[in-house]
Image: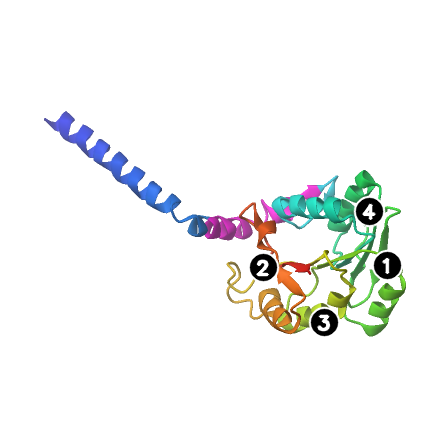
């Protein structure tokens, strides 16, 4: 009798577990958010341990894959990036441009980190991304009629991102993208105590700039550091 009781209890437990798992999997957004939080909390294993051809690249590989799809499709003449850090993402963009045989990268950071990768397609600039003279210099480096894509990934405080959006949004050409990174901060769904950041800056920017729209189709791999951050210029 004890054996039957044990078997019955195990069977009941298995059924209950299966029901609970089925209920959980019918809530995909909840699953995505939990994994997103786990991925971000495991930084030493995940985004702080991600490299492109040996260069530290502090990104989600799922976002990098989407970035290369956009670069291939749009074939921008110029990619402007704020927030160079160690140069991993600009190196990634340059290598994708090598493969398609087109494009150059202008990347800016207030810090000049050593040992950044050298590549003929990359121009490194050192300044605050919102300094007026820096923005004017970047404008002079873009020729009339060139297609421009912009990535914003520097200081993630709301006022700074808003200023970047104001300054760099006009550089983006129609049918190209203004990609605002780390909109997942301030509880969207990570770092709930961060305070207003990229997500909130995007909210205000979209109210004032109806020619941009979030392209949620670029979030197709479910986990993205940039929810509502892929802004398509109409």
Label 1 near label 3: C-beta < 8 Å? no
Residue to which mark 1 is pinned? 145
Structural crowding at the residue carrying mark 1, measured as other residues with C-alpha within 10 Å and reported as few (<14), some (14–19) or many (≥20):
few
Q: Is residue 117 left or right of residue 176?
A: right
Residue under the image location 86 percent in, 55 percent down = 123
Secondary structure of the residue carrying numbered label 4: loop
Q: How far apart are the alpha carbons under marks 4 and 3?
A: 30 Å
Query: 168 or 53, which is in the foreground?
Result: 168
Asked if the magenta segment contains residue 206, the reply would be: no
Q: Can residue 60 be seen from the camera position used here?
A: yes
Residue to which mark 3 is pinned? 166
Where in the figure is residue 177, as x and y percent of width and height?
70, 57
Residue 174 badge? none
Residue to which mark 4 is pinned? 117
Structural crowding at the residue carrying mark 3, measured as other residues with C-alpha within 10 Å and reported as few (<14), some (14–19) or many (≥20):
some
Q: How far apart are the alpha carbons under marks 2 and 3?
A: 17 Å
Q: How far apart are the alpha carbons under marks 4 and 1?
A: 29 Å
**Does 108 sit above or below residue 35?**
below
Residue to which mark 2 is pinned? 228
**In the rendered structure, which disc, 3 or 1, sits on the residue that comes first in sequence?**
1
Residue range highlighted in magenta: 32-51
Front of the two marks 2 and 1 = 1
Q: How far apart are the alpha carbons under marks 2 and 4?
A: 30 Å
Location of residue 69 (image quadrant): top right
């Amino acid at each position: 009798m004890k054996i039957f009781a044990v078997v019955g209890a195990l069977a009941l437990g298995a059924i209950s577990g299966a029901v609970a798992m089925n209920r959980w999997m019918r809530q995909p957004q909840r699953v995505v958010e939990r994994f997103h939080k786990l991925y971000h909390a495991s930084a030493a294993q995940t985004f702080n341990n991600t490299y492109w051809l040996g260069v530290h690249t502090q990104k989600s590989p799922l976002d990098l894959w989407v970035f290369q799809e956009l670069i291939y499709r749009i074939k921008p003449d110029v990619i402007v990036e704020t927030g160079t850090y160690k140069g991993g993402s600009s190196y990634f963009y340059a290598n994708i441009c090598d493969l398609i045989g087109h494009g150059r990268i202008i990347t800016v950071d207030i810090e000049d980190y050593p040992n950044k990768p050298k590549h003929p397609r990359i121009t490194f600039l050192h300044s605050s991304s919102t300094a007026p003279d820096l923005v004017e210099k970047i404008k002079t480096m873009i020729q009339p009629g060139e297609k421009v894509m912009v990535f914003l990934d520097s200081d993630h405080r709301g006022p700074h991102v808003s200023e970047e959006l104001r300054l760099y949004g006009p550089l983006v050409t129609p049918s190209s993208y203004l990609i605002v990174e780390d909109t997942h901060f301030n509880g969207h769904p990570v770092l709930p105590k961060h305070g207003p950041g990229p997500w909130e800056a995007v909210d205000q920017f979209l109210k004032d700039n109806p020619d941009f729209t979030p392209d949620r189709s670029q979030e197709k791999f479910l986990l993205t550091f940039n929810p509502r951050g892929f802004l398509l210029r109409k």
